[in-house]
Amino acid sequence: MIPARAVLFDLDGTLVDPAGGITGGILHALFRHGIRHPGDEHLESLVGPPLASGLMTVPGMTEELLPQVIADYRDQYAAHGMAASRVYPGIEELLTALRADGRILAVATSKPEPLARQLLAAKGLDGYFDSIHGSAPDEVSAPTRTSGKPHIVAAALQASGKGPQDTIMVGDRLHDIEGARANGLSAIGVAWGFAADGELEAAGAAAVVQSPADLGRLLGAAGAVVGATAREGSA
């Protein structure tokens, strides 16, 4: 049991299933600029890390194309991707239980902060969180691309008012684990997101859970956390 008083959550792949909204939007933007499909595995690996740095790993991407590709992706995501996204089954029950237990809850995501706030509000999750933290709106700027998840986790930790020993990070990619460790936090990985097999364990996750109910039990949340596993619900 890890009874942390503050819990920091990643967003896409942890709280919300993008349901193809991210990968579809990226493909739309790539195709508009004549860049070929990078392959399903490579495409899914772009969900989680800062978008600018992830896109630069796609064959055919250039620094000159990057700002417009991101702008085209954001337009497509706003028009279609956000509506397609859905809250993983069991997440609202988990958040309710944690709030009832007096935990401080925050979001720490690589998604631009204004877009993260918009998505959380659209899905009815914003009211569960004491603070929401994301990347700067200008994802192409050098400071944003070099700060990454450690900077975002640090901001969420400071806003929580708790120390590293009383705070846990929850996420679905190695960047979440690394961002936590850079700030002296332990991290829990969730198996229903976008990590490759063994990715979370190799990054140093203290535990990897299979469902929100398992996560609630590990955090020692008061009350029952029920529902299907997130992976089953996202099929």
Image (cartoon, rainbow, N blue to C red):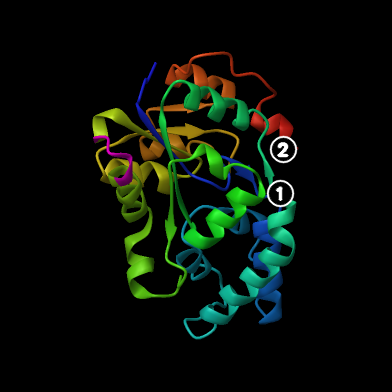
Residue 234 numbered tag: 2
The x, y position of residue 168, in whole percent, is 36, 32
Magenta segment's dominant SS is: loop
Q: Nearer the viewer, residue 165 or 56?
A: 165
**Crowd band around label 1 with a 10 angstrom C-alpha radius: few (<14), some (14–19), many (20+):** some
Could you tell me if the residues under marks 1 and 2 are in contact, i.e. CB atoms within 8 Å?
Answer: yes
Image: magenta residue range: 159-163
- At 59% from the left and 48% from the top, the residue drawn is 120
- Amino acid of disc 1: Ala
- At 24% from the left and 39% from the top, the residue drawn is 184
Q: Secondary structure at mark 1?
A: loop
Is the C terminus in the top left, top right, bottom left or bottom right quadrant? top right
Vertical arrangement, residue 197 with respect to residue 120, above or below: above
Is the N terminus in the top left, top right, bottom left or bottom right quadrant? top left
Q: Which residue is mark 1?
A: 19
Disc 1/disc 2 C-alpha distance (Å): 8 Å
- Amino acid of disc 2: Ser
Q: Is residue 108 left or right of residue 213?
A: left
The x, y position of residue 43, in whole percent, is 62, 59
- At 58% from the left and 81% from the top, the residue drawn is 68
